[in-house]
Image (spheres, rainbow, N blue to C red):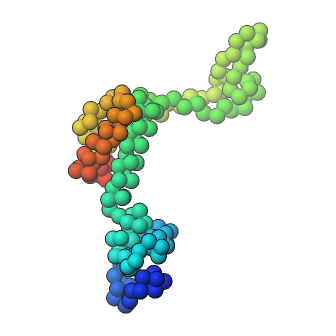
Amino acid sequence: MVRLAAVTNATIDPPKIAAYVDILGSEPVPALIRAFELAERACTWFPSPAELLKLAGRSPEQLEEQEIACVWSFVRDYIAKHRVHGMPRSERVQPKDCGECRDGWRVSKTGNSVKRCPCTECRVAPAPEIPATIKAALGEIGGLQAVRDTTPEFQLRLRDAFTDFGNQNSLRNKS
């Protein structure tokens, strides 16, 4: 902070330092270091805490945008794993070494067929519940099926509509 003040010819006093520490104290240190380094190169004046947060990528708007992107990613991953109807997903567990198979597969005695060995378990994981606020946002844009069935160009517009809904009705409370 002192170095930034020297670079920008600003004067800082203990009350100003205390205010900055109070406002910025809960932010991650690496993000703040990055913000101060960027400010040294880009600012011709001593930046306010809000400007430092923006340089750190931690302004309220940026955090909201990051959160919307995470929720959108959750929706896309949900569709990829569970389809639009919330199908359970089967996952094979690493085979146990039973001595009768190779990597969970048994070859018939004639050598003409291969089948899964019983030592390989199949675990079925139910689809997770979609949080109510995300369900509401999806309802506004036509549901999971609308997200799945759109072209890539239209998906950008759909994501924007989803973001607009999220900004109006905070998606922060996801349960």
Q: Position of residue 1 (x, y in %)?
A: 45, 81
Closest to the observer: 47 or 142? Answer: 47
Closest to the observer: 74 or 46? Answer: 46
Closest to the observer: 55 or 163? Answer: 55
Look at the image and tell me whether residue 39 can be seen. yes
In the image, 102: left or right of 163?
A: right
Q: Quadrant of residue 95?
A: top right
Residue found at x 63% / y 28%: 120
Q: Position of residue 17 (x, y in %)?
A: 38, 85
Q: Quadrant of residue 140?
A: top left
Residue found at x 26% / y 36%: 141
Residue found at x 76% / y 27%: 99
Look at the image and tell me whether residue 25 can be seen. no
Q: Position of residue 2 (x, y in %)?
A: 46, 85
Q: Is residue 57 above or below residue 118?
A: below
Residue found at x 25% / y 45%: 165
Q: Is residue 9 above or below residue 71?
A: below
In the image, 99: left or right of 142?
A: right
Q: Quadrant of residue 153?
A: top left
Q: Is residue 77 above or below residue 121?
A: below
Q: Is residue 75 above or below residue 172?
A: above
